[in-house]
Amino acid sequence: MGEQSGAQNAWDMLSDEQSQKHITTGSGDLNDILGGGIHCKEVTEIGGVPGVGKTQLGIQLAINVQIPVEYGGLGGKAVYIDTEGSFMVERVYQIAEGCIRDILEHFPHSHEKSSSGQKQLQPEHFLADIYYFRICSYTEQIAVINYLEKFLGEHKDVRIVVIDNVTFHFRQDFEDLALRTRVLSGLSLKLMKIAKTYNLAVVLLNQVTTKFTEGSFQLTLALGDSWSHSCTNRLILYWNGNERYAHLDKSPSLPVASAPYAVTGKGIRDAVSSHHKRARVT
Amino acid sequence: MAAAGGGGGGGGRATTSGCGLKRRYSPHDKEEETMNQDQSSKEDWCGRLWNGMDLLKDVTENKHVLPTGLEGIDTLLGGGLRQGQLTEVTGPSSSGKTQVCLHSASHVAVKHMGVVMYLDTSNSFSPSRIATIIDGTNDLSDQRGFDLPHKERLKTMMRSIVCKSVFDIFGMFEVLHQLEVSLLNDKVKSGGRKICLLIVDSISSLLAPIIGGKYPQGRSMMISVAMILKKLAYKHNLSVLVTNHMVSAGNGAVKPALGESWKAVPHVRLVISRVHGSNICTATVLKHTLLASGRTAKFVVPS
């Protein structure tokens, strides 16, 4: 067969895939249902009602992507695109501290090393490696996603792009629904391309709305059917009584599954009822 | 399908009159003379002339089906994905469309039927899933790979699946053009494995950004890519499998995307759905060239 540029056979892709590191969520149970963590080269949508912890998880991932390679992380930087103003810097600092404390607990002799080029385990450095964009309208959102390609070409160490949240500016004031569908489909293809080209994870946080189907109200992700195919994986966060749960709803390689998690002072961790003995950093 | 004079050549005055019929020429002495001397190349322009028996022979001998490996789907399809045809699988999010594609690709690879080209628009092609599916088939009866150790057999099978990411419609036109060129070249050379299955997962996400507005370009690009896919299927005896998503049809109902013009394009259309929380899916035939539509079957996506 003729040569197609950029085409790879499945066997070569398999060995590439097996050497990929995943971004830990902070909760061992969550990591398990995700096959080790959030995958690079894929777009993962995380949906949930307000208050369930989407932004917390988004921030946790922006921190965890920075865990240095010698501690089992990706040692990358993060881009955080904030559409609602949910990014509370004080909380980010807290989560960074929590992450560092867990690294030191897991690797007790790390503070003795101090080779140059190694990331200093200080919350300030973790904050410095998050590139933050605050956008206030859908045109700004379109602009920033278009700009991302150039930005990522100049900052090749970015390994995660979090958009919190992706549908907010498209839900109100958009009269022409057909136009909205076209614009969003175009954005989602761009994000897919970015994930693949720059080998990073794209995480899209999404609100949940209620939809009246088959005689009962069901929770569905905002923008429904036309948007629902625009991601590689989908994780739904929900309440089960007083506990928070995550449900893997869509994945090309993993089975549908649920796992509990908790939002603690240190960030996302395993639920108290989990069998994981202590919080995993890697 | 008209032999659209795109090939140029001949005199500017020559006209074609539809598929399969010989050209009629307006009187132009010099041209007619040269034309008459060149009898065989004239026939080449309008494609081969078939009669019913030729077609039947071709269908029985050359047009095989490629089973997907999912029993319910293969039953509905009358054996599998037919060569020379375009099959569409549509359904709501997470209903199993990508799994049908991955299974079809794996099954062709396991049976050594040829090369699979997988065009992926949502980074959903999973090599580890392919490996799991192939491992699950337990194909010990396959003679060709019989003496090789397991890893070597897996390697040979997986190397026959080629994946390319496509993120916009122009990229798609480019890929299909390259494919056409390489297929035409391979006809001249010999040897090397030939592609027998082309999968596009999903064609609708490439078209969603451009159709539905007041300008018709989007729709004409959709028809254009449809014609190219069908032409590839017909000329090179490929099975083409595409996936489509669903959009709302009002009052909470859903319908396949891509609208009315697309409905006539695929030869076979299946709509699938999955019961939430299980891996049992249901498939229904929306359209089929040979079998009755409306039939339903259940199939299981193995984990």
Image (cartoon, coloured by chain):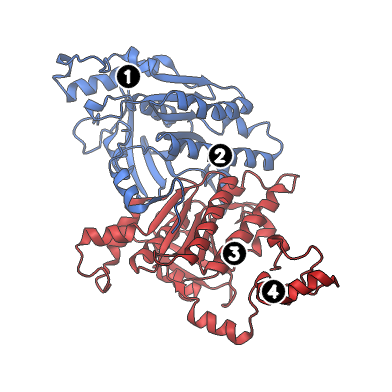
Distance from label 2 to label 4 (Cα)? 65 Å
3 or 1: mark nearer the eye:
3
Letter of the chain that mark 2 sits on in the rendering: A
Distance from label 4 to label 1 (Cα)? 80 Å
Shade of chain B as shown in the rendered figure? red
Height in image: B67 above or below B150? below
Instruction: Tell me the kind of residue under disc 3.
Output: Lys
Please indicate whether residue A224 sits to the left or right of residue B260 in the image: left
Letter of the chain that mark 3 sits on in the rendering: B
Instruction: Tell me the kind of residue under disc 1.
Output: Ala
Please rate how many residues cluster around mark 4, counting C-alpha atoms within 10 Å: few if below 14, some from 14 to 19, many from 20: few
Instruction: Tell me the kind of residue under disc 4.
Output: Asp
Distance from label 2 to label 1 (Cα)? 30 Å
**Where residue B38 is drawn, which disc sits there?**
4
Q: Quadrant of the N terminus of chain A?
A: bottom left
Height in image: A90 above or below B47? above
Task: Pick whichever, B176 or A185, lies toward us.
Answer: B176
Coordinates of residue A217 in the picture (x, y in percent):
54, 46
Whether the residues at callouts 4 and 1 have beta carbons within 8 Å, the answer is no
Q: Secondary structure at mark 2?
A: loop
Residues tagged by mark 2 and mark 1 found on one chain of the structure = yes
Please rate how many residues cluster around mark 2, counting C-alpha atoms within 10 Å: few if below 14, some from 14 to 19, many from 20: many
Residue occupying image coordinates x 69% and y 74%: B38
Q: Which residue is mark 2?
A: A222
Q: Which chain is blue?
A: A
**Where residue B230 is drawn, which disc sits there?**
3
Please rate how many residues cluster around mark 1, counting C-alpha atoms within 10 Å: few if below 14, some from 14 to 19, many from 20: many
Distance from label 3 to label 1 (Cα)? 55 Å
- Residue A51 showing in the rendered view: no
Whether the residues at callouts 3 and 1 have beta carbons within 8 Å, the answer is no
Coordinates of residue A187 in the picture (x, y in percent):
57, 37
Q: Which residue is mark 1?
A: A96
